[in-house]
């Protein structure tokens, strides 16, 4: 046993922190983004139950969890349809500077990261990383990402192919 989990709890990611100027980031399928300083979390032992992360609405799940320095980071979100087969919906992509998203406390719901268009009801992909990020399909073909959009909760632009990887 590495960590104690209560009923309904789930491990959504593990990060290794290299310095104190890092933000922990959660992005959910209902397009909520929550971030807070890594310094707000104290180390956990084997008997620890992890940390309070993002508060999920009914039916939502975590699409991305990671750690990033706030400076020069961007948020990439891709919205689509929850009823589409995985890897078949290209969706709409949005790239936004990380600094446009206000921080909130642990255990809260976060702020909206992308507005869904007609036929879209979920985030099918999300990533936070240092600009510029590059995306590709499952087969490794490049997928062009748009220039950063300063509007944190805007809708995205249509993609030519489904994004499977981004880094």
Image (tube, rainbow, N blue to C red):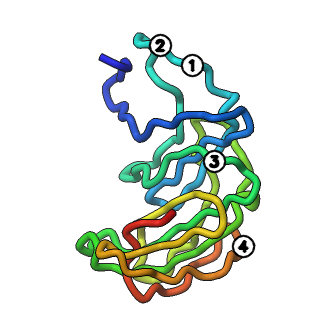
> Does dot 3 land on a helix, a strand or a loop?
strand
From the top left corner, tell me how far across and down residue 79 is, in percent.
46, 72
Q: Earlier in the sequence, mark 4 or mark 3?
A: 3
From the top left corner, tell me how far across and down residue 165 is, in percent.
41, 66
Q: Nearer the viewer, mark 1 or mark 4?
A: 1
Which residue is tagged 4?
Answer: 151
> Does dot 1 land on a helix, a strand or a loop?
loop
Q: Earlier in the sequence, mark 3 or mark 2?
A: 2
Q: Are marks 2 and 1 in contact (CB under 8 Å)?
A: yes
**Label 1 environment density (alpha carbons within 10 Å; few <14, some 14–19, many ≥20):** few
Q: Earlier in the sequence, mark 1 or mark 4?
A: 1
> Does dot 2 land on a helix, a strand or a loop?
loop
Which residue is tagged 3?
Answer: 68
> Does dot 4 land on a helix, a strand or a loop?
loop
Which residue is tagged 1?
Answer: 43
| Disc marking residue 45 | 2
């Amino acid at each position: 046993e590495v960590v104690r989990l209560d009923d309904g709890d789930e491990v959504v990611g593990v990060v290794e922190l290299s310095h104190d100027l890092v933000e922990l980031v959660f992005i959910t399928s209902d397009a909520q983004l929550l971030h807070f300083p890594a310094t707000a979390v104290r180390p956990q032992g084997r008997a620890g139950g992890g940390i309070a992360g993002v508060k999920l609405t009914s039916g939502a799940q975590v699409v991305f969890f990671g750690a990033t320095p706030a400076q020069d980071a961007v948020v990439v979100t891709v919205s689509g349809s929850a009823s589409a087969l995985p890897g078949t919906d290209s969706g709409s992509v949005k790239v936004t500077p990380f600094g446009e998203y206000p921080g909130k406390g642990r255990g809260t719901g976060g702020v909206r990261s992308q507005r869904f268009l007609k036929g879209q009801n979920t985030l099918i992909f999300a990533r936070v990383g240092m600009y510029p990020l590059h995306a590709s399909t499952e087969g490794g073909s490049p997928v062009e990402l748009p220039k950063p959009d300063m509007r944190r909760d805007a809708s995205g632009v249509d993609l030519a192919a489904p994004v499977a990887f981004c880094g």
